[in-house]
Image: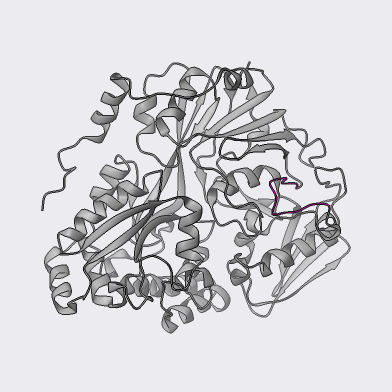
Amino acid sequence: MTHIFANLNRRSFVKGAVATGVVAGTISMRDIAMAADGKTFTFGRTRETKHLDPHTSQLSSSWHIQHMVYDSLVTLDDDFKVQPALASSWEWQGSDLVFAIRDGVKFANGRAMTMDDVKKSIERALTSKGNPWGLMLRNKSGISVDGNKLTIGFKSPNNVALDALTATLVCIIPTEELEAGTWDPKSDKFMGTGPYSVAEHIANDRWVLKRNPHYWGGEAKTETVVVRTIPEVQSLVAALRDGSIDAAAFDSNPDAPDLLAGAPNVEMATMSTTDFNYTGMNAVSPDSPFTDIRVRQAVALSLDRKQIVDFAFGGRAEVTYGWTQWNLTDDSKLKFRDRDLERAKELIKQAKPSRTTFPYLVRAGSNHAAIAQIIKQSLAEIGLNAELEAVDGGVWAKRVWGTNPSDMVMTNSAYTGFAHPLITAHWWAPDLSRFTKGYVPENADYTAALNKATTAASGDAIVPSLQTLYEILNEQCVKIPLCVNTETIAWRSDRVAMTPSKKQAQNDILNGVENYEMKV
């Protein structure tokens, strides 16, 4: 079968769309005025914040806002090195990780942060339903406070704990107000110790954040940050061109650079990430054809990763077979790495699946549908018929992660890569990471290698355990990595002076926004 997109040059198509006026916007004059008042930085993105409680937020669209409001004990720099945040310093004392907590920190309501807030926040995060971070610190022995020192004790080494504590999923919240019932973390009234707090939220439209006058890091240079949700990339581009927004991120949409090419006063930067796209199959549900490992392996052998990168990402992504963005593993040892249609057809012939037509669930928007379209064509070449079904991101999360067995047969999405390869490695271990239990079967060898890499091995011994993990997941073919994401950040250089991060590990796309300076 010939790919229907084989002769289509995506960039030529996009340039043609611009020339014929396909790009259109639906932004009001009020928005243009707001973006030009000299005190407000207006940012556009394609997805709305769906999850509100920072300790249970599973979607990166939520983290975009939460990163500006909440702080964790530690944070990351552009090289993914751990840096101080609410903890001014830290050290390992044997198996204990000891943090010195910063003095003079206040929440946005003016109340001083206490050590009780710090301890209870971390305990809440690690025990909250839907928060997998307790997995990373699963060998902890306890959390204690002595003066301004917070100690997390461990029963054995933990190679991922410090990196894991940089995420907003373990941020510090005002637990005094939570316990008094005067503040609800599940509402859209986010309140933390970060540079901004939420002033207004209009669902599926905008978040308005005001400068936190009590921010421990000093007063933010921009008084107000408005984050607009503009689902269509063409409208997002139009808003940037006409000045109704000052900057935008495009959720890895490959068309953005071409749509913005030649736009006056628009600068662009590419943000590399550790995020990667994957396709996943339900190997648990009895009516799924993918309970047979041979069918899953056939899918892996059918995939044309280069075609996915070229069409779905306009060539602006990097093929991956695992977590190879960390450059720690030997891909040549992976058995189901390269495309081999004849071998795939033979596996289908051996398996004789009773069901060859099935639904393929994708999140609407972004480029997930484009990825699925290429995979659908690859599957057709080995006799499998995938019927695409696009749903909202919240519905997708509930059907894939919130049911057991998962209410899907096949899907694709992207994982945030975070700051350490062992974090994402947990999502393949359903006996530990419960949210994948609905479609990933347990594998004792994988869990053993993961435990060794996380809580037993040290130094050079971690890498062989990682290699074992990669080879097992490659052979099992339940979730198959496809390519590593890049993000395009664009801004009006005549309106704002900003320097986006060059690299991101956890979707903090507005990292450093408190230092942006408005020009008008």
Name the residue nearer the viewer: 382 or 204.
Answer: 204
Q: Can you say whether 184 is above or below 46 in the image?
A: below
Name the residue nearer the viewer: 28 or 510.
Answer: 28
| Residue in view at x 16 percent, y 44 percent | 4
| Residue in view at x 85 percent, y 50 percent | 103
Name the residue nearer the viewer: 27 or 67.
Answer: 27
* Rendering quarter of residue 196: top right
* Rendering quarter of residue 237: top left
Name the residue nearer the viewer: 26 or 472.
Answer: 26
| Residue in view at x 63 percent, y 35 percent | 513
Look at the magenta stretch and give its main secondary structure.
Answer: loop
Please provide percent x and percent y for residue 188. 68, 46
Horizontally, residue 114 falls left or right of residue 327, namely right
In the rendered image, residue 39 lying in the magenta stretch gets the answer no
Colouring convention used in this rendered image of the protein:
one colour
Please provide percent x and percent y for residue 520. 63, 15
Please provide percent x and percent y for residue 276. 41, 54
Count of labels in the image: 0
Please provide percent x and percent y for residue 475. 30, 74
Q: Which residues are magenta?
A: 182-191
| Residue in view at x 81 percent, y 35 percent | 213
